[in-house]
Image (tube, rainbow, N blue to C red):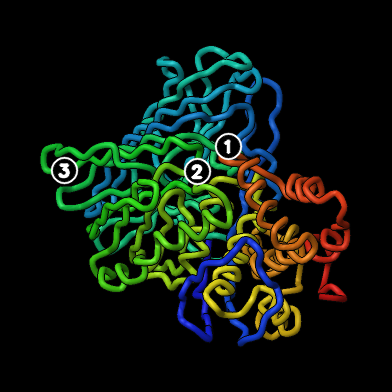
Amino acid sequence: MSRSARLVRSRSRFRLRSRSRARSVAGAGAVVLVLALSPSLAACDGVGSSGGGSASGVGDPYFPKSGNAGYDVTHYALDLAYDPAAHRLTGTARITARATEPLAEFNLDLKGLEVEKVTVEGGEAAFTHEDQELTVRPSGALAEGETFETTVRYAGSPVTITDPDGSKEGWLRTADGALALGQPTGSMAWFPGNHHPSDKASYDVTVTVPKGLTAVSNGELRGERAVGGRTAFAWRTAEPMASYLATLAIGRYEVTRSTVEGGLPMYVAVDPTQAAAGRKALARLPEVMEWAAYNFGPYPFSSGGAIVDRPEDVKYALETQNRPVFPGAPQALLLVHEIAHQWFGDSVTPRTWRDLWLNEGFATYAEWLWTEDEGGATAQETFQQLYDEGEDLYEDLWSFPPAKPTDAENIAANPVYQRGAMVIHKIRQTVGDDAFFDLVQGWTAAHRHGNATTAEFTAYVEKQAPDKDFTPIWRDWLHGEGKPDQA
């Protein structure tokens, strides 16, 4: 994710050169400054569960109300219809889940929409809905280990959610439709669910919109059919996806379908006002994906692409699964950043919002690697300049360690991005280039389509290089307060 413009000074154009696995961390040349005043994004809420029913929340350190205990969602089937003129969304969500404890009741997250009816296993269920908490009481208790289907019918005017850092997410209106973005809590504005990154699921999303508009979501387009004066678009995401990575874009788009190396299907949707700039900016998308796969391991999903739209009051890009969303034609480094997230964040997803540095540190470091490969500053030069001039470039750079943001307002502040990337570079310095890229590819393979914590990452690194001492990196760079004494 990038919630700010990244101002880049580079000594050269982006010309990717072939190279061996070995890389030199030393090198001459002008230093590229990635001036990302990385915004904060709020974290998720959660609580633990108590006997007889799931509690609202899973105990996340930043958003204690998001997510829900007591069950694990395996699949969402969403049947939606949206009328932009009336700003009205109607939906039926069929949620397949497995009870992880006996449940007399359970909670779903849904904000700003009116619930009309809830059934569990076909039987009507009692429910209450207050703020974002939809509490469901089935007619009979659910046994631990039982798989069950919950159907929620709902409607209303979907809301925009303001994060603690002031940025907007949820349901965002555009000139000709809408754009749904979910990081960290916005997905509850358009469908009920267990909205925490620790619970990933597959998705089927069917969206009916007025004729002439297109509806774009994650995964692959499975069908398109006329329904009276409207059109229904059916999308399927087979690989597990955290709900904050789900997206829905409705409007008029210039759509391009293609394939890249290996036959991977690509679906790119660009707002017509951005068509010329978007085509030029995204021309390097196949190249960026090939470069990322070379460095980080096989691409983890069955399709790719991008969405370029113009939502009101939104200036950030987001790594929505399969096809990132950009608020206008992206520059090369922003494209690299969001594509890197397909590995770091989308496939390997943080277990809690405190682990977000694993997403943003790696995605920021991908920018450093791309710049290095393009003949610009080496990653070592970028690291050194950050260490030497960090206070001038980012006022808050040393304000807290990347693995422990101070609060929800700061979970995507500069220490998470920039200092997070510095942690990754210190690992590279310690193990050497060959071992570093083997380690990175091993990490993305080990946790492919799963969740991971900071503790699991540090343990993995230590296991892969048992002869190296990582204690100073964890102590001073990852968890330590203030600026480390030595670079």
Cα separation, mark 1 vs mark 3, equals 33 Å
Q: Is residue 159 visible?
A: no
Residue closest to the eye, 276 or 315: 276
User: What residue is disc 1 on?
Assistant: 199
Choose top left, top right, bottom left or bottom right for residue 389: bottom right
Judging from the image, what secondary structure is the residue with disc 1 in? loop
Judging from the image, what secondary structure is the residue with disc 3 in? strand
Judging from the image, what secondary structure is the residue with disc 2 in? helix
User: What residue is disc 2 on?
Assistant: 243
Q: Position of residue 480 (x, y in %)?
A: 84, 64
- Which label number is shown at residue 230? 3
The type of residue carrying mark 2 is Ser
Q: Residue at x 34, y 42 (%)?
A: 220
Q: Earlier in the sequence, mark 1 or mark 3?
A: 1
Of marks 1 and 3, the one in the foreground: 1
Q: Is residue 411 left or right of residue 134?
A: right
The type of residue carrying mark 1 is Asp
Q: Is residue 359 left or right of residue 469?
A: left
Q: Residue at x 58, y 37 (%)?
A: 199
Q: Is residue 279 above or below residue 460?
A: below
Q: Earlier in the sequence, mark 2 or mark 1?
A: 1
Q: Position of residue 168 (x, y in %)?
A: 47, 62
